[in-house]
Image (tube, coloured by chain):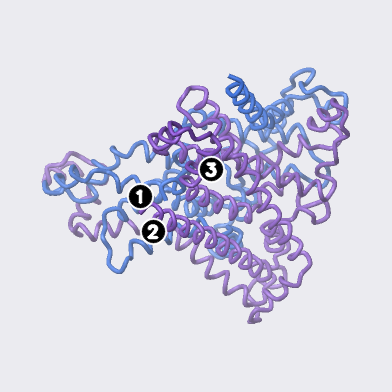
Chain colours: A blue, B purple
Amino acid sequence: MIGRLLKALLILIALAVALGPFVVLVLNSIRPSDEFLSASAGFLPSEATFEYYAAIFDPDESTLRYLVNSLIITTATTVIAVAFGALAAYSLARLRLPFKLSLVIGLAFLVVRFYPKITVALPYYLMMREVGLLDTHLAVILAHVSITVPFVVWLLLGFFEELPREIELSAMLDGCGPVRRFIKIVLPLSAPALGAAAVLTAFLSWNEFLMASTVAPNFAKTLPVRVSGFITDKGIQWGNMSAMGTVIVAPVVIFALFTQRYLARGLTVGAVKG
Amino acid sequence: MARSSSQLTGGEGLPGGPIARAGERLGERGALALFLVPALAVIAVAQFYPLVESIIITTHDWTLARSPVMGRFVGLDNYARALTDPQFVGSTGFTLLLAVGSTVISLAFGLGLALLTVGEGFHFRLSRTLLMLPMVIAPVAVGTMWRMILAARVGPLNQALAGIGIDGPNWLGDPNWAAASVIIVDAWQWTPFVTIVMAAALASLPADVLRAAEVDGAGRWTIFRRIVFPMILPVFLLVAMFRAIDALMTLDIIFTTTGGGPGFATQTLSFWIYQQGLRYFNISYAAAASWILLAGCLVVAAGFLVWRSRISGWQRERGA
């Protein structure tokens, strides 16, 4: 009995530590500005104000454009990475290549997870400058697909390898080629795994800062890059920063609560099975 | 249009019908091999080509502010310069401290929370879901949250401490406290990663072995130490590896918590390289430093993988 109470208490403390910062962020986004620098202000704001949301969504602030940029980049990255990744994973699961080539290609995808992206960011910036793609959605999308497609490949590879091959074999005997089998049989059977891959990719792209800030400083700027811009030498605009932080965090949290199972599956990729 | 031709193969109108027919003409293996092309092309163009380009740059002299094209060949000068630069050495020191601190803290709390919340009851699943939230949000947003919480005079943490009579430190203003703060913030964000993976590993343990141990009268601690932990150790080491290399690459949260300060106390290597390369445009110098970091990450990853394969080897031998 005491053991169970202690366990419940520990879980509650952990929840408070994990969720407390979210509460602080949201409360600060509606806190009147004179309560930021006063030590006498309470944990709860004395009244709610929405001036910061109004301020950041002011037409001059371009926040709306950054929001649209983030949505475009996240959507495109997710669609492309899942499509390309699913094709590659299916190929690796079914194709027997000579000289352990399948293993080499699989490792080529895996290795992307193991080095710092700052090493790639510098030459990638120069490359985009060279081809005139600086500050375009395409430059960010290409970078994000290249970072996320390895996750998709490894997540789906394990899934495709365990998919029973009987149906595919009988379709093959009926003269159904690989493209048709992939679209008509494999993809419908893989909906949960594809969902997990899509959710993981969307989170990675929505939150990504380094590549986006490197190649998209102005026009194609994304929300995370904008948030980092609130820290200026002139001092911090607490209210606007909190409102902007809430705008980035809230959709992800809501999405995470609804896709919890997919997400947990995506986040544990490789670690448990390997 | 596509419909009339797809009748030949007896299939319905299928998106990409012409592609499917082209695929069939290529033959089974040819079509499957082509499936690899888009994904490989993307990582070749956006990852491997820049990596190769980067190595070449490190052996040349290039400051973008001075010249739009790469300068003369300088061999390993850029590497030598980095290794003797106090800023590089200092940020390496902090990066290592952060990696060890954040990894150890997140592993300890993450495994603890996994043990606490493993189970299929509604409460456990809800707890796991809520505990997962710190890791799904953008690191720059995490930094923003904690910057407010840790604010010296008006932050809620120090106000709470004042409430119980403790004069809280200047978390982000004092070099030592700032370093500790960044470590705690990074551990806060990534503890859920450890929890989720370890909870999945714990849930997949064979129940009959655990029950047999309980029947034999083994205490909880003994069961954990002698049975559970050895069984989850391979997964644990893999998680430790990912935590360690990710912490070595830490960049985003530095921008929104401390900006590398006070002074240079909390500059990570990635952050310092970012400043050198993308702010001051010392391209070749930054690239060389980034390769030293890359080598470090690979060495750490290899170390954990060797450790893990040895343990799996022992376990197989003992099991046989």
Mark 2 residue element:
helix
Q: Which mark is residue A157?
A: 1
Say which residue label 2 marks.
A106
**Which mark is nearer the camera, 3 or 2?**
3
- Are the residues at dot 1 and dot 3 in contact (C-beta closer than 8 Å)? no
- The chain that hosts pointer 2 is A
Residue A49 percent location from the top left of the image: 74, 21
Q: Horizontal and vertical percent for residue A99?
A: 30, 69
Is residue A264 toward the left or the right of residue A122 in the image?
left
State whether residue A54 appears in this view: no
Q: For numbered disc 1, what is the local secondary structure?
A: helix
Q: Chain of mark 3?
A: B
**Of all residues shown, which one is farthest toward the front?**
B216
Kind of residue at disc 3: Arg
Give the residue at mark 3: B225
Q: Is residue A182 visible?
A: yes
Residue A128: x, y in percent? 56, 61
Q: Specify the amino acid type for callout 2.
A: Gly
Query: Marks 1 and 3: which is nearer the front?
Result: 3
Could you give the CA–CA distance between mark 1 and mark 3, rounded to whole angstroms? 34 Å
How many residues crowd mark 2 within 10 Å: few (<14), some (14–19), many (20+)?
A: some
The amino acid marked with disc number 1 is Leu
Measure the alpha-carbon separation of dots 3 and 2: 35 Å
- The reply, left or right, for residue B264 in relation to residue A107 is right
